[in-house]
Amino acid sequence: MIDRRTFVSGATASAMVIAASRATAATPATIRARNIVLAHGLFADGSCWLDVISRLQSQGYHCTAVQNPLTTLPDAVASVRRVLDRQDGPTVLVGHSFSGMLVTEAGVHPRVSALVYVAARAPDADEDYAALAKQYPTPPASAGIVFDGDEGRLSEAAFVHDFAGDLPEARARLLYSVQSPFQKALLTGRTTQAAWRIKPSFYAVSTQDRTINPDLERFMAKRMGAKTIEVQASHLSLISKPDVIAGLIVEAAGGTA
């Protein structure tokens, strides 16, 4: 059964504290949405959502992929908010990997009707995500992050075998060749709000994930009371299992997969 929380339009941080006691909150009806905004994480750009977007567009959804600048958390959140401002009605906000931070922060936007996390970070307000992640075994991909000064990227071996492990090697190498580098400052930011405390939330756990520990994903999904599915996939389930991910997004939008 989906644990749905009250959808609060134009929520503020103080309202989020009040809404945190979800056990006594009324269960709202599903808010139908035709707009889908999708944010990407590290080692990627907006094109990583193409396979999911094609499936959503075929069902009549209006989709926009955010181009996350991967510079600082405030810059990245601002890039999502600008896209949300352009939507003309209820909108499902979707984030993969690091961009779960953006969903958590920007998801309080009044146009956001539901949140979808795809193998994504889902911190609480002002939570030290790095400290939380250290409570679980370090995933193999972490060893493959390399820096040139303040600019970080994933090595080819780590990208192909740990980040995109269930994709054909040729496809993985293509994705590696167009990965977007990130700035070290991006990793220091903390969310100031936790949209999942006030918005219906959905989570796709990648059971073969070697970039975020799957048990950490399960913990975050359970903590937020999300409707959770487990996908037999690497960290890139949005590419290896686009039908499954698109189906979860459609459910969050109040439709039928």
Image (cartoon, rainbow, N blue to C red):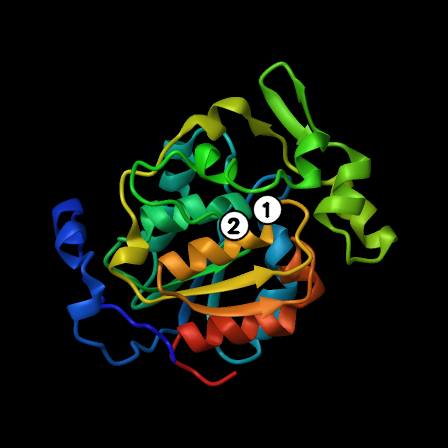
* Residue matched to label 2: 216
Residue 128 visible (yes or no)? yes
Q: Position of residue 2 (x, y in %)?
A: 37, 76
Residue 93 visible (yes or no)? no
Q: Position of residue 12 (x, y in %)?
A: 16, 48
Left or right of residue 180: residue 121: left
Left or right of residue 247: residue 76: left
- Name the image quarter holding residue 43: top right
Q: Give the vertical position of 147 relative to 112 (above or below).
A: above
User: Toward the viewer: 86 or 178?
Assistant: 178
* Residue at (49% x, 78% y) in the render: 60
User: Toward the viewer: 137 or 146?
Assistant: 137
Q: Give the vertical position of 36 relative to 48 (above or below).
A: below
* Residue matched to label 1: 212
Q: Amino acid at mark 1?
A: Ile
* Residue at (50% x, 39% y) in the render: 135
In the picture, the disc for residue 146 is none
Left or right of residue 51: residue 176: right
Secondary structure under tag 1 reads loop
